[in-house]
Image: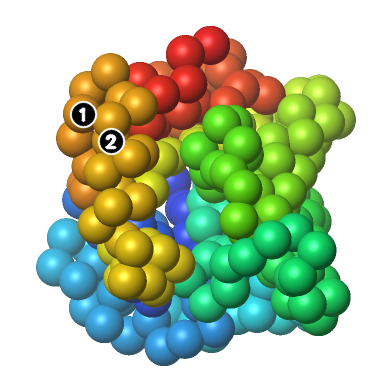
Amino acid sequence: MNMQGKVVVVTGAARGIGREYAVALGRAGASVLVCDVSDCAETADLVAQATQHVVATTMDVASSESTLAAAQLAVEKFGRIDGLVNNAALYGTLKGGRFDDIPEEEWDAAMAVNVKGVWNCCKAVVPAMRKSGGGSIVNISSLAATYGMPGRLHYTASKAAVIGLTRGLARELGRDLIRVNTVAPAAVMTEGTKEFFGGKVTSALDVIRSNQAIQKTLQVEDLAGAILYLLSDASKLVTGQTLSVDGGTIMH
């Protein structure tokens, strides 16, 4: 899973699993553009410990102009784009509750970031991938979509939409040798997960873990291998797939 010579854009990279993806890619030899609505300087410093080929920028995935500017920056700095990790999402800030109590503006915000944001980022990078003869897009879904999580239907629905988007896009882009896959993790121990579940985080993680064949709460480093596999040439004929990294909760 050597990433030498490859250029990868990672969204939502300011903290948590996005940061871990970026660091793992740097260690594997990739040039990395780290993006977030928040400052990515700390992430870039960590990636720079493995490779000097890292650039940080602010980007709002809900804005097509912002995503296009980030893609253009990657091409300007590194000459090409080979991979995209669509990690940015509204998660910890979303409020829980019955589906009919979700404020309409919060539903719309979840869809704008978690679904439209993936679409925007794909549109931004695909021209550069076509020019360089192919590429790999990894979208991040969730156990919430594959299992069906109540209480935050806007999040669950948005992550289910990511899987549908992945499958349709994989068929559209196959002729361009661009692969599109999804990783669907269980809850990962991050600040976002703590925010998501609030005071119930311990009991929520206990319930999630009890449904796993391997009863271990995911840590950020547990996802890096799946991302590297899907971005590297090791998976060059894998497309349209959803890889569940959930300790054996969903078994396809």
Residue 189 seen by the camera: no
Asked whether disc 1 touches disc 2, contact meaning CB atoms under 8 Å apart, the reply is yes
Residue 100: which numbered mark, if any?
Answer: none
Q: Quadrant of residue 212?
A: top left
Q: Quadrant of residue 182?
A: top right
Q: With respect to residue 124, does 188 lie above or below?
A: above
Q: With respect to residue 30, does 63 lie above or below?
A: below
Q: Which residue is mark 2?
A: 209
Q: With respect to residue 4, does 16 lie above or below?
A: below
- Amino acid found under the numbered disc labelled 2: Arg
**In the image, residue 177 lies at what x, y percent?**
70, 27
Residue shown at the point (43%, 46%) measured from the top left:
6
Residue 215: which numbered mark, if any?
Answer: 1
Residue shown at the point (33%, 40%) measured from the top left:
207
> Looking at the image, what colour scheme do you see?
rainbow
Packing grade of label 2 (10 A; few <14, some 14-19, many >=20) is: many
Residue at mark 1 to residue at mark 2: CA–CA distance: 5 Å
- Amino acid found under the numbered disc labelled 1: Gln
User: Which residue is the extreme one toward the left?
Assistant: 49
User: Which is more toward the observer, 170 or 95?
Assistant: 95
